[in-house]
Each structure stands twice: as C-alpha cells, then as structure tokens.
C-alpha cells in the first residue's frame, strides 16, 4: 500500500511555502532585533524540517541520473510518412534531428529528467531515462509514441440523419454502404450517463480546417481540470474565423481530432470563433499535462518503441563510489579549514553550510530534480560560493574589530557591508542559471536547476542563518571576543602597475589555446560531440560481464577516442554489453574484447562461430548540433545578462572587464585540456559552466570593493591606487576561498576515478585561471576602458550611486 506524505500534496506544500515566505519578508522588514532573532529562528527550523522531511528516505526521494544510478533504455524506430498518393517517404536526417529535439522537450520540459538521447542507425533513436520504475514505463512509452497530430474538422449537418434502415448517415458511410463526397467517417468514443464508453461513427469533412502547426500555446486549462486550453497563432485565428463565420449558432459542430481519434465534437455556441478553444474530457491521471506537452512538441513522423532495457550507470558503480568518497573528504576538509581558521565563529559557518546542504538536497527531492554529474558541478560551485560568503563576512568582521568597534557592532557592520558583495555575486550567477534553464536543454538544464537552488540556499544560509546564530550567541553572552587566524595580511602589491605584462601573458595563453584547437581539430572532441559506433554483445541469461572487466581488457589498447561501456538488461534477450566508441576503433575493440574476455571468446564446436553474437551500428553525438547551438546561445545571453546587470549596478567598464575575464578563463581551460591530449565530452560541459560561474563570482567581489573604495575615498588618491588597494584588501578572501575550493576539487580529481579525474582537473585549472583573471585581467581592463578618452571612473561611479540612492529614496 502506497503512503502519500503531506509534501506530495500541492496544497499543503503551497500553504507551508506561503507561511515561510511571509516570515521571510517579515524578518527583513522588522527593525526590532529580538523579533528578527525569533522570526529568523522559526524560519531556520521550518526550512530545515521541511527539507529533511522531503529528503527522507534518501534512497527513495533522491533521483540519480543515468550517469550515476543507471535507468532504462528505449530503442525507438521512426516510421515513414506517406505522400499524397499513399507511397511511403524515406526518413530524412532532418526528421530524425527534429524527433530527437521533440523527445527531449517532452521528457525534460522542466529539467527534472535529463535523458540521454542519440540517433541510432538511419531511422532509430536511443533514449536512456534515469531511474524508471516499472509503473512509469507505460507512461513514458505513451509520451514517446504520441504523435499529437491535431486537426479541427467540420461536422456534417447530416451526420445524425437516419435512413430507411435505421442507420445514421455516418454509420452508413462507415459501413461503406454510402459515399458522401467531401466527407469521411471517423470513430468517436463517448461515455453515457452511467459512465460506460460507447463508440459511434461521426461524419467529418475530408479537409482539415486547421492543424497543430497553427497552435502557439497549449496549457492545462485553469478553469477546467480535465481540459487543455489551446491558443492559435494569427493564421490559425484566420482559419478559425473562416471556418465558423457562416455556421449556425447552437446547431453546427466542429470536431477536434487528435491522432485520428475524435476527442470531442462540441456545438458552436458563438460565431465566429477566435483564437482560443479547449480540448476536454481528459480524465486519466497526467493526461492533461502529457497532451499539453505533446501538442507543444508534435512529431512529424510516428515513433514506435521496439524494446525497453534497464541500463547500468554510464560512469560505472566504482566511479560513483569513488566520487562519493572524494566528496566526503572534500567536505570534511572544508569544515576543518573553516573551524581551524575562524575558530569559534567557524562553528556558526559550519552550521550554515550544513543547512545549505540540507536545503539543496531537500528542494531537489521535493520537486523531483535529478542528480547528474553536471548537476554535481553546480553543487560544487554553490558550496564554493557558500564558503565564499562566510569568508567575506568574517574578513569584514576582522576589519571592523581592528577598527576598534565592539563585537556586537562589528558583527552588525560586517553583515551589512558584506551583503552588497554577496548579493551582486549571487545575482549575476542567478541571471546566468535562469537563462541557461530557459534556453538550454539536457544536462545544461540540470546544471542550471542545481545552481539556482544552490544560490538561493547559500544566500539564505549565509545571510540569515548565520546572522540568527550570532544574535543568539550575543544575547546569551556565548562570545566575549572573537579571534581569527591571519595568514594573509593586506599588503601594498602593485597589481595594476604590471598590467601590460599580465595581459601579454594572457594573450599568449589564449593564442596557444586557440591554436591547439586548430591543430587537433576533430581529435579534440570526444564521441559525445562527434558520434561514433555502438557495439553490442548479446550475452543472454546465463553469461555476465562487468564494465570493470571491459576496462581491464582495453587498458593497454591505443584508441583514437575514449569509449563508454554499459551493461543492459532486457526481459526478452537477457544481458547486453554495449560500448559507444569512435568508428575507426570499433573493430579493434571487438577483437581485443574477444581475445581477453573468455565469455566473448567462446565458439560453437559445430561451426566455430562465436556463441555470444555481436553487432555494430552508427550512433549520433549525445551533444548534437542543436544542443550545441542552444547551449552557446544560452551561455552568450547569460553573459550578456551579466553585462547589463553590471553596467546598471557598477559601470560599463566593469561589465566589459568581467565579460572578457570569463571568455579568457573558458578559452584557456579548454585549451589546456586539448593541449594535454584530452577530449572534450559531456563531462566538460558541466565543468566549463562551473568555471564561468566561479570566475564571475570571484570578479564581482573585487569589483564591489573597488566601487566601495571609489565612493568612500572621493577626493584621495588616483584611480589606479584606489583599485590596487581594493585588490589588496580582498586578497586574503580571494586566496582563502580559491584555496579551499581548489583543495576540494583536487580531492575529487585524485580520488574520484577516471571520469571524475577529468572533471576535477578542468575545474582545478578553471579556479587557478579564474583567480588569476579576477586579479590581473578584469581590473586592468576596467582601468584601461574607463581612462581612455579622458574618462573619470570615480565620477561615473559616484553619479551611478547617486542615481541609485535617488531611486531608493523615491516613495
């Protein structure tokens, strides 16, 4: 018997969320300290309890991706369409590409599933879905096979006309007893007053009045639970008006036909009709949502599911275990570092980080989001940002205490001054993640979801949770004084004085990175980008092979590209070993596996043929052309959104510096991978997005201090000196945060297995390069752009701040 928890009731979840939201706004609007402390405590306990309930039990509530936990594979075949003369037309590559795009949108519209989809042969598609339970298989099959071909047809006024044989005209046409030119009989299923289904013919026009191509929007109807609301485009509206303008109100009917089945045939109550109508009578669970999704993503060609199999994780169980072990070590180190460096106040930071993790996992479980490797990349970035927020607050606290303020006053001032930097850094990352979710697909969506949740939870934990804990500590006199380690003291390093040297070095590194792509060309891309061959060995019921045995057999083999093994289970054919590899390597891999693995080498004594049959077929890239275009557009618009925000919040020269620094980091990181003989794969997509997010976060912190110094020191010192001082002031925070994050990622790289080794290595390079660009590239570009043509950065920033104050002061 299935138990439904309160969190699975949308109404309960909505009410709880609304209460927490009201408390959240109350917390920030009240000025009474004791009230702030109490409201914050209720919020803290409420959010923690909600998330712990959502994540319990973890094995059932947390969804792993196909790369981590495996799932189910669906082999699909695209059916050919018929031309006007009834002849079958061959399936084109364009139709396959469109079908893949439609499937991805149907299965992953909200970014919660993250399926792997690839072309298989000329007219086949392989879909791998994470964690599919038996009861979900039928629903997924229905989603995959639904063509969603919508048509509106006029119902003949004579359809119900009864003849001498007591049959309706529609029945006589269906029985081929009579022909009505221009009309055709369809079957309509309706329920009578007792709820019993009855199927009867209905006579419709042979010509459709309008179709799915005229739909601009299909959503569940807000007025009717069993209906989908349809909105037509301009052409569709014109067709609807042409169809209904001469109809008789309350008499004539229009039939709504979906995939050849008459869904309903309502009487036209008002003429002419416009652009809005609805399909009702959808009473099965999930039917409304599935139909709305299908109508927004119709298939040109029908699909059939040939076979369904369970599949092992693409990364392998050993890699997953190694990744978990590495993650635990990295987390322990982070806690130890915070506690060692910030001592008693470090305990409060650790409490905030733990709650941040609870919130991240709880929200992911609450809304059914999937954990994949790119998603874990987003988690690493948010943990780094959460540590960074605490370091920012504590370094500010150090400055306030050094200025002679009391502990209570210093704590309040440190949170107030650190808030703008934390807010700006997180908002820029949030802009990117929202745009990536909006325009991206597949793993890009997964990364964006995890990053968005992580940003919100880290801001909540750093700004509210730790502040509430400090309030309790001060009210109960738990802290009389706070001491921190101070290994990196503010200096007077002339960072900008050597800017020409640093920029020259960076230009050389960028040029070498770009040249590496030109020289290596296709060799720089793995089969996730290029596609290749899918090898299959049918092992049957009694033979078993592990991916570890495959790796051991192929360890010393010289291959042009990396391969990816999986174990699949089918109820009809038993166990299958599949490998995705580069096409030139396929025969070499087959020969090596048959030589080294006894099960594959067995021959039939009668005809000497191999007992375990093998096959090969072409597969497309997992990161296809459409995916790449969407991802590039999403990333570009994300960077553009950051530039717009930074221009409004700071000044255009800051936006330009941040933009160039991100591009600099991405190009050099990819270049290092290619220079060292690596191949870019799906793993690197998450790594590069993480690097972009980390880079802009690091840069914003320095920019925020530059802006503050420009406002506070209005008449003292040159722009270059003020900027140098700002970089020196944030140097301890930059080194501490980068060092802690770098150690965590290096741990992941060393202990996380081969797949995570590449992932961790790229992010490690990204952290080093991102820290370099934040200090030596972004700030010099701001200085150069603002000073060209005699510009005055100080005056521009002050004018911008004055405008912001005026807007805030406006009632």
Image (spheres, helix red, strand yellow):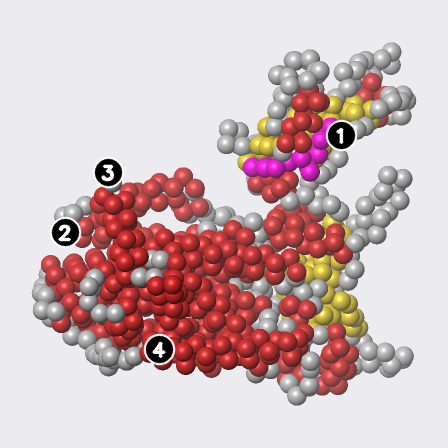
Q: Is residue 534 left or right of residue 3?
A: right
Give the labeled residue for mark 2. 33
Q: Residue at x 28, y 48 (%)?
A: 803
Give the labeled residue for mark 4. 739
Place of residue 809 in the rendered image (x, y in percent of width and height, measured from the top left): 23, 43
Give the labeled residue for mark 1. 208
In 3D space, how far apart are the residues under numbered discs 4 and 3 (Cα atoms)? 45 Å
Can residue 667 be seen by looking at this rendering?
Answer: yes
Name the residue nearer the viewer: 373 or 687: 687
Describe the element under mark 3 as helix, strand or loop: loop
Which badge, 4 or 3, comes first in the chain's sequence?
A: 4
Give the labeled residue for mark 3. 811
In 3D space, how far apart are the residues under numbered discs 3 and 2 (Cα atoms)? 25 Å
In 3D space, how far apart are the residues under numbered discs 1 and 3 (Cα atoms)? 57 Å
Describe the element under mark 4 as helix, strand or loop: helix
The quarter holding residue 84 reads: top right
Place of residue 385 in the rendered image (x, y in percent of width and height, measured from the top left): 36, 65
In 3D space, how far apart are the residues under numbered discs 4 and 1 (Cα atoms)? 66 Å
């Amino acid at each position: 018997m299935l138990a439904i928890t309160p969190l699975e009731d949308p109404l309960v979840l909505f009410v709880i969320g609304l209460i927490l939201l009201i408390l959240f706004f109350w917390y920030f609007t009240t000025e009474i300290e004791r009230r702030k402390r109490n409201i914050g405590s209720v919020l803290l306990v409420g959010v923690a309890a909600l998330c712990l309930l959502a994540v319990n039990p973890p094995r059932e509530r947390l969804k792993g991706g196909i790369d981590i936990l495996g799932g189910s594979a669906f082999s699909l075949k695209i059916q050919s369409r018929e031309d006007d003369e009834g002849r079958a037309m061959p399936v084109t590559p364009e139709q396959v590409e469109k079908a893949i795009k439609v499937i991805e949108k149907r299965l992953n519209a909200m970014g919660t599933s993250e399926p792997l989809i690839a072309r298989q042969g000329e007219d086949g598609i392989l879909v791998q879905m994470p964690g599919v339970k038996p009861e979900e298989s039928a629903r997924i099959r229905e989603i995959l096979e639904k063509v969603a071909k919508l048509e509106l047809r006029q119902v003949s006024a004579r359809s119900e006309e009864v003849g001498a044989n007591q049959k309706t005209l529609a029945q006589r046409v269906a029985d081929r007893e009579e022909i009505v030119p221009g009309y055709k009989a369809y079957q309509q299923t309706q329920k009578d007053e007792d709820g019993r289904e009855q199927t009867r013919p209905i006579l419709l026009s042979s010509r459709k009045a309008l179709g799915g191509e005229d739909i601009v929007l299909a959503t569940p109807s807000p007025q009717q639970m069993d209906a989908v609301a349809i909105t037509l485009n301009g052409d569709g509206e014109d067709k609807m008006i042409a169809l209904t303008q001469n109809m008789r109100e309350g008499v004539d009917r229009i039939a709504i036909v979906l995939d050849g089945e008459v869904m309903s045939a309502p009487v036209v109550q008002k003429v002419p009709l416009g652009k809005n109508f609805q399909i009702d009578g959808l009473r099965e669970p999930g039917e409304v949502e599935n139909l709305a999704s299908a109508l927004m993503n119709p298939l040109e060609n029908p699909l059939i599911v040939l076979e369904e199999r369970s599949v092992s994780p693409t990364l392998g169980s050993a890699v997953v275990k190694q990744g978990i072990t590495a993650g635990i070590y990295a987390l322990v180190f982070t806690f130890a570092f915070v506690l060692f460096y910030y001592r008693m106040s470090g305990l409060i930071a650790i409490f905030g980080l733990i709650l941040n993790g609870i919130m991240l996992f709880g929200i992911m479980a609450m809304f059914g989001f999937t954990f994949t490797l790119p998603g874990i990349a987003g988690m690493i970035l948010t943990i780094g940002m959460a540590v960074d927020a605490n370091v920012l607050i504590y370094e500010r606290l150090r400055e306030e205490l050094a200025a002679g303020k009391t502990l209570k006053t210093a704590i309040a001032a440190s949170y107030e001054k650190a808030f703008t930097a934390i807010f700006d850094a997180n908002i820029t990352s949030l802009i990117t993640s929202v745009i990536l979710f909006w325009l991206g697909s597949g793993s890009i969506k997964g990364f964006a979801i995890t990053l968005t949740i992580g940003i919100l939870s880290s801001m909540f934990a750093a700004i509210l949770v730790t502040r509430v804990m400090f309030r309790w500590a001060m009210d109960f006199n738990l802290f009389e004084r706070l001491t921190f380690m101070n290994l990196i003291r503010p200096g007077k390093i002339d960072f900008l004085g050597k800017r020409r040297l640093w920029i020259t070095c960076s230009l050389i590194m960028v040029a070498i990175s770009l040249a590496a792509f030109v020289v290596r060309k296709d060799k720089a891309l793995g089969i996730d980008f290029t596609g290749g061959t899918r090898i299959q060995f049918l092992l049957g019921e009694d033979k078993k092979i592990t991916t570890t045995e495959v790796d051991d057999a192929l360890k010393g083999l010289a291959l042009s590209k990396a391969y990816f093994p999986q174990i699949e289970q089918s109820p009809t054919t038993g166990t299958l070993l599949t490998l995705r590899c580069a096409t030139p390597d396929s025969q070499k891999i087959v020969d090596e596996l048959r030589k080294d693995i006894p099960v594959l080498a067995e021959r039939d004594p009668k005809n000497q043929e191999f007992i375990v049959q093998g096959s090969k077929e072409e597969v497309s890239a997992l990161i296809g052309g459409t995916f790449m275009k969407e991802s590039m557009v999403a990333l570009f618009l994300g960077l553009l959104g950051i530039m717009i925000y930074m221009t409004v919040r700071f000044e255009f020269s800051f936006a330009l510096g941040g933009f160039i620094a991100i591009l600099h980091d991405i190009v050099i990181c990819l270049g290092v991978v290619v220079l060292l003989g690596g191949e870019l794969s799906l793993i690197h997509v998450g790594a590069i997005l993480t690097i972009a997010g980390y880079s802009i976060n690091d840069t914003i912190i320095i920019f925020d201090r530059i802006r503050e110094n420009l406002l506070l020191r209005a008449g003292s010192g040159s722009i270059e000196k003020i900027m140098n001082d700002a970089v020196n002031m944030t140097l301890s925070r930059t080194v501490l945060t980068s060092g802690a994050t770098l150690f965590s990622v290096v741990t992941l790289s060393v202990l996380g297995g081969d797949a995570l080794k590449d992932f961790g290595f790229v992010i490690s390079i990204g952290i080093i390069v991102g820290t370099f660009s934040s200090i030596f590239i972004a700030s010099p570009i701001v200085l150069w752009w603002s000073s060209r043509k005699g510009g005055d950065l100080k005056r521009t920033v002050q004018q911008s701040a004055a405008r912001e104050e005026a807007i805030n002061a406006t009632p």
